[in-house]
Image (cartoon, grey):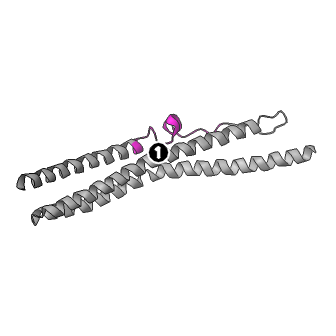
Amino acid sequence: MGEKVDDVKKEYFQILLQQYSESWQDIRNYSNSVWQIPTLLITAISVLGIAYAQSYLYQNQAARILILLLGFGFTLVSLIALIKHRFFCDRRVDDFTEIQQQLKTLLKGKNNEFECKEIRFKSKELAEGRCCIYHTSAYNWALGLTISILLGIALLLAREFILVAIHA
């Protein structure tokens, strides 16, 4: 009967190790993907900015408003993606921490030949704030950039609507 318990513990240990590895990979993927959102946003806003400048050459106010609305919508979607990114990264870190605690508990036996050491993050920012990107410059930079672009487009839209009201 003791062998069955040991086999179950070994199997459970292997499952936890696999989950641990996959959770850590998820955290790294989320941390790396934070850079993709502002890159796509800047690309889209650059294309829309060129179109916006061209609409000034042709004195087409309706086109400028449409371009600004598209830019505003795309920026708003990017902002929501960043917030969603932060939420799911937080969940991944919670899972990772729970799996790590289960591994430590499982390895705390007297007959155990393993010594469990807690995996340390490469930098303090990765472990603080409950998410790997909460305090890193990548997330703060991306969020600040997205909010700045959103406010800039909102100001341009307000200007265009004021011009429409004046000319009407």
Residue located at (57% from left, 42% from top): 93
* Secondary structure category for the residue under label 1: helix
Region of the chain picked out in magenta, as a range: 118-139
Q: Is residue 57 left or right of residue 27?
A: left
The amino acid type of the residue labelled 1 equals: Arg
Question: Is-magenta flag for residue 77?
Answer: no
The residue that mark 1 highlights is 86
Depth check: 18 or 161 in front?
Answer: 161
Res 139 visible = yes
In the displayed orientation, state which residue is furthest to the bottom. 58
Q: Is residue 138 magenta?
A: yes
Report the quarter where the N terminus lies: top right
Q: Residue at position x 56%, y 51% from top?
A: 26
Crowding near the residue tagged with mark 1, few <14, some 14–19, many ≥20 C-alpha atoms within 10 Å? many
Q: Position of residue 163 (x, y in %)?
A: 10, 53
Q: Residue at x 31, y 59 (%)?
A: 43
Residue 82 location (% of width, % of height): 41, 48
Farthest right residue? 1
Q: Quadrant of the C terminus?
A: bottom left
Q: Residue furthest top?
A: 110
53 left or right, relative to 94 = left
Q: Is residue 15 left or right of residue 39?
A: right
Q: Nearer the viewer, residue 123 or 1?
A: 1
Image coordinates of residue 153 in percent, x first then y, are 23, 51
Residue in the picture at 71% in, 40% down: 103
Snapshot quadrant of residue 42: bottom left
Residue 49 visible (yes or no): no
Quarter of the image holding residue 108?
top right
Give the x, y percent position of residue 36: 41, 55
